[in-house]
Amino acid sequence: MTMEMKDSGSVVLTAYHPHSPARIPGMEQSFVQDIPPSHSPTSRKSLPRCRRINRMLSSESAPPPAFSRSNSQASMDSTSMEDFWCEVESIKESSEDGSEEATLLEFKPADEGELEAEWLQDVGLSTLISGAEEEDGQALLSTLTRTQAAAVQKRYNTYTQTLRKKNKHTVRDVRDIFGTSDSSTTFETVPVSPVPSNGIQLPGQKPVWKSVSSNSCLDCGLDKGSPSVTEELSYEVSFSESITVLPKTQEWPKNQRFKKEDSALPKFIVRKSRFGLTEVGDLSPEDMKKIRYLSLIELTAFYDALGVELKRNRAERVRGRENGLFGVPLTILLENDQKKVPGIKVPLIFQKLLLKLEETGLETEGILRVPGSASRVKNLHQELEAKFYEDTFDWDQVRNNDAAGLLKMFIRELPSPLFTVEYLPAFITLVEKISKIKLQIQALHLLIMLLPEANRDTAKAFLQFLKKVVANEGKNKMNLWNVSMIVAPNLFIYKGKRANQQEMQAAATTAHIVRLLIRYQDILWTVPSFLISQVRKMNEAAMNNSKRQLMFDKGVRKLLRRKTMERERPERPEGAVTFPPYLQSDIPEGVIRVYAPLHSKVSMAIQLNSQTKAKDILARFHCENSRSSSQNIRGQIQSLHEIGGNIGQHCLDPDAYMLDVYRANPQAEWVIKPKAS
């Protein structure tokens, strides 16, 4: 069975539409009321409501519905969509019986120019609005590629033109910011040619981003019996720059098709460069903040290159609880949990629900699809709120289907959606307006990089669980499409409102998004190496700016002069030779000193060659300390970290070639310590 995807107008989820009412309590109206009466004959009243809804929306309905349906919706039969509508009905019923509390979202329609101003602030370029000269903004601008620079300039031009029309205040000319003689041209950008994946190409040096052997790669998307054709994804060049090689006259097919069978999804591989692969948790929070800036710029440039509008929602205020378990913002929930378990990244209640289901529910037939008892789930919800933090809650009493219901309730009850209010329209657009799955994954990849840390870590734990559910399909009868159809309404149809016709049309779209998230999650949690390269350049530019600032600081110069004079007062011994600073180092070129503070042998100088990998250094330390290792490191996974220089902190891939990493960041320190969980 194939599903047609029509290049229709974008779907905006009404929960976040600027002109939506602030609050629609309880989802009072039935979904059937959205359908003309002629489509609800009394002869069908005996059927379950979710099946009646599905038949009315399927191509099997006798007279076509009065509203226009997308091709994707029209091509789906009642069997393939029934899970989705049953889940929607279950969500509606749980809201009506009061087991879920309504959340208030307030919106303010975007004023002309405000969206561009918000965009500039969100990418770390608020200095373009304020007019201040700040190093961070200059450093960011200096790293942009051609397409990224064009995206920034386009938004800034729109912003300044709007302000001039309103005569609010004098606006900086785009030429003053970008250093161009013509406002239609872009400022100097980094080369489009490939650069080292985690490093910076040295002058006169050939790129070092060679692929390693075929067994050292990240692959996703293929199960037994799937097609053997694979496609490679590249992280070396920005996605938006890759789009520019396509003919400008190319149009996306209007009747895109994709199959709902799991085996229909293509297989993608990401070959490891000589710098290895970097996961989202491998970088410091400061560098991940810069990754988010760059990801939004790159996503915007990517959509621009495809001729697709990047739509965003504006949620002015979210009212959530400040304590408890359900309906509490993720950041507040984590702050409360971290008082009990320092460093925790996923809420304790969410972890416990996942653990319960992984231990006893993965083989339960119909898990996630078959609803638990509404009354039991409501009672368990209240009991958890009262007893969870006191460790007096009896988990043995919780049935698997009830635990699954609580898990989905937790996601729906979040005051702000797991994938954020702002970018839910962008998730929908990437399927409706982009035809190729490879391009969809690239857009999805950047959207994942944009998520706040708490949302990203929670989403990662959830998707890893869903992958385990699919892996047990033989026993639980839940394949990838089944799971996606059940999860989609919990993620993309927001609680506290009734679904409208547009959302019903988007059912297959949202299910396809969830399917991509589950199948290709290993790719999505990997930080694109071209973004890491840009972060390195940002840090280097910031350091150079700081050095120049110090040189002009009179107080610092006087202090340095006085210190120099004090050092020169003692007479040098006769015959002594003074070497320049770069020759005074006790570590020769190509040798690094590795520190392992938790080992008995805390440091070691290691000569690097072209074949030395991070795992080789770890193995050497393990061999040297195997007999005398302290108890506090046994059982811990030790990793080699790159710290300082042009990176904050970077946990290295065991397959990273150290000489290449060293040349990209010669000022770094190298430390062996446990990897952050």
Image (cartoon, grey):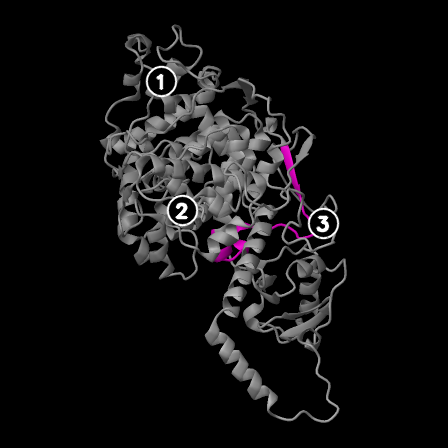
Q: Amino acid at mark 1?
A: Ile
Which of the labelled discs sits on residue 53, or is there none?
A: 1
Tell me the distance, in whole angstroms, between the alpha carbons under discs 2 and 3: 34 Å
Give how far across and how far down residue 63 sits, in percent. 38, 6
Instruction: Give the foreground label among 3 and 1.
Output: 3
Whether residue 217 is visible, yes or no, is yes
Q: CA distance from mark 1 to mark 2?
A: 43 Å
Q: CA distance from mark 3 to mark 1?
A: 57 Å
Q: Nearer the viewer, mark 1 or mark 2?
A: 2
Residue 607 figure quarter:
bottom right
Residue 148 sits in which quadrant? top right
Which of the pair 108/267 is nearer the observer? Answer: 108
Q: Nearer the viewer, mark 2 or mark 3?
A: 2
Determine whether the residue tagged by mark 1 lies in a helix, strand or loop: helix
Crowding at label 3, few (<14), some or many (≥20) Cα neighbours within 10 Å?
some
Q: Which residue does the numbered mark 2 point to in the structure image?
A: 121
User: Residue 640: horizontal and vertical position, in percent?
Assistant: 62, 62
Looking at the image, which residue sits at the far front? 181
Instruction: Report the residue that reaches farthest toward the top.
Output: 63
Secondary element at image label 3: loop
